[in-house]
């Protein structure tokens, strides 16, 4: 998909795996892909960081409410590894999904699910799709204290890319894995799941992009799965992709992402529990606007972060849009410097303000983190390395 390759939140086969330890560039050495509010009031960022000894590693860092680092935890060897998503673990600690690159083949990745303890030390790690090419973009905890990760799998680089799901128990042991896709003998189809959430009845919802290809986007979709990973139904929407989803207390589902509209625009859609569209909204001009992660706001509305760039500009800024419960735009804010700055993960704090993580290439290469008021005014900004 053409815009995926330009977004560092999906930094894998395109950038990280092409960079050896002796080929480090000034930009894109580190970034935050996900942010979670810890039970103790602190925050945990998941992403990637460059190490002189082992190249690009999957990286977790815990920070306090002021953005000061409490601990850091790296995972990886001499090839490229990264986390895309992190959640609070069942019974404590933190669980992240991402990928690990094979030590014998620098072009093949395996879906990674890994748990660390409260202090960031290792508890367990599980790999799936070993020998194929697979990655885990998102995960959710389940009512039986397990975890399900979603992403994609492909047998080789010119083959179909299928949705891939893997479930582990609380100890990281495999329960099941599933492959779902629109296989064809005439051309490779890209089916990918970027976000997952469990509903109150134990069913599971995923979103992503369906029936795309290497040069263009498929359709944003919502799929309902049984607790054992079997597809129950699928609804497709506009050409584009769903990158995040949230289930509200009334069972309705919000999906955030990107749509091929006026170029590429931020996309926000609300659907019923049965997948029927309630409303959809787009945001953007003649440039590039991309929605990454959304949260259900405490006032019943929605907040979504992402990336915005003026037409023809190589500079990108972090975007934060706030919508009311009807999907009407309440306000929009941008953050960043004079280079590429991208917002990928977001949380809302108890006081109604927000924190965003991502990456910043303005003045170097950093993991971005900020804190805003409830109306999006920036209170502080950190650049971590």
Image (cartoon, rainbow, N blue to C red):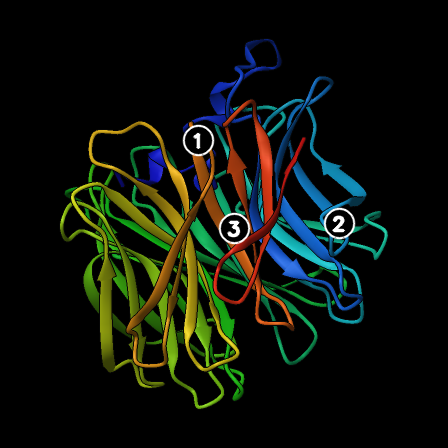
Contact? badges 1 and 2 (CB < 8 Å): no
Q: Is residue 85 visible?
A: no
Q: In which image quadrant can residue 170 be found?
A: bottom right
Q: Earlier in the sequence, mark 1 or mark 2?
A: 1
Q: Is residue 154 left or right of residue 312?
A: right
Question: Callout 2: few (<14), some (14-19), or many (20+) C-alpha neighbours within 10 Å?
Answer: many
Circle nearer the viewer, 2 or 3 = 2
Q: In which image quadrant can residue 364 be found?
A: top right
Q: Where does the image place residue 212, in percent across and percent down from the top left?
A: 22, 48
- The quarter of the image holding the C terminus is top right
- The quarter of the image holding the N terminus is top left
Q: Earlier in the sequence, mark 3 or mark 1?
A: 1
Q: Nearer the viewer, residue 149 or 296?
A: 296
Question: Which residue is under mark 2?
Answer: 62
Q: Where does the image place residue 12, in percent across and percent down from the top left?
A: 47, 34
Residue 265 numbered tag: none
Label 1, label 2: how far apart the Cα atoms are: 27 Å
Above/below status of 164 relative to 60: below
Residue 13 numbered tag: 1
Above/below status of 100 relative to 326: above
Question: Which residue is under mark 3?
Answer: 136
Q: Which residue does the image show at 50% across and 82% down from the upper left?
A: 199
Q: Which residue does the image show at 67% across and 22% down from the upper left?
A: 78
Mark 2: which secondary structure? strand
Q: Which residue does the image show at 49% across and 74% down from the upper left?
A: 297
Q: Which residue does the image show at 51% across and 22% down from the upper left?
A: 27
Q: Where does the image place residue 244, in percent across and percent down from the top left?
A: 42, 61
Q: In which image quadrant can residue 240 be found?
A: bottom left
Label 2, label 3: how far apart the Cα atoms are: 21 Å
């Amino acid at each position: 998909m053409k815009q995926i390759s330009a977004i560092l939140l999906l930094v894998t086969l395109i950038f990280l795996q092409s960079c050896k330890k002796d080929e480090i560039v000034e930009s894109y050495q580190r970034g935050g892909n996900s942010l979670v509010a810890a039970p103790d009031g602190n925050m945990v960022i998941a992403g990637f960081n460059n190490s002189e000894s082992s190249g690009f590693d999957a990286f977790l860092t815990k920070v306090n409410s002021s953005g000061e680092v409490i601990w850091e935890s790296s995972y990886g060897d001499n090839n490229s590894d990264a986390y895309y998503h992190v959640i609070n673990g069942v019974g404590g600690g933190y669980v992240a999904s991402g990928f690990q690159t094979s030590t014998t083949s620098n072009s093949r990745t395996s879906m990674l699910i890994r748990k660390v303890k409260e202090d960031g030390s290792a508890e367990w790690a599980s790999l799936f799709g070993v020998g194929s090419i697979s990655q885990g973009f998102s995960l959710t905890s389940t009512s039986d204290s397990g975890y399900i990760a979603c992403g994609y799998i492909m047998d080789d680089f010119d083959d179909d890319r299928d949705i891939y799901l893997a479930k582990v128990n609380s100890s990281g042991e495999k329960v099941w894995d599933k492959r779902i896709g629109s296989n064809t003998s005439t051309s490779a189809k890209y089916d990918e799941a970027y976000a997952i959430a469990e509903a109150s009845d134990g069913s599971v919802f995923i979103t992503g992009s369906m029936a795309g290809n290497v040069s263009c986007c498929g359709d944003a979709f919502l799929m309902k799965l049984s607790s054992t990973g079997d597809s129950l139904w699928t609804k497709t929407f506009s050409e584009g992709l769903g990158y995040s989803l949230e289930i509200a207390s009334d069972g309705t589902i919000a999906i955030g992402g990107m749509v091929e509209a006026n170029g590429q625009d931020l996309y926000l859609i609300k659907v019923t529990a049965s997948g029927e569209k309630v409303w959809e909204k787009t945001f953007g001009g003649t440039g590039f606007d991309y929605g990454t992660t959304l949260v259900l706001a405490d006032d019943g509305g929605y907040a979504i972060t992402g990336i915005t760039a003026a037409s023809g500009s190589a500079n990108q800024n972090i975007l934060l849009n706030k919508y009311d419960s009807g999907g009407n735009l309440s306000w929009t804010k941008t953050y960043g410097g004079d280079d590429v700055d991208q917002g990928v993960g977001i949380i809302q704090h108890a006081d109604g303000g927000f924190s965003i993580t991502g990456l910043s290439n303005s003045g170097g290469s950093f993991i971005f983190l900020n804190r805003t008021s409830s109306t999006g005014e920036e209170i502080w900004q950190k650049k971590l390395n």
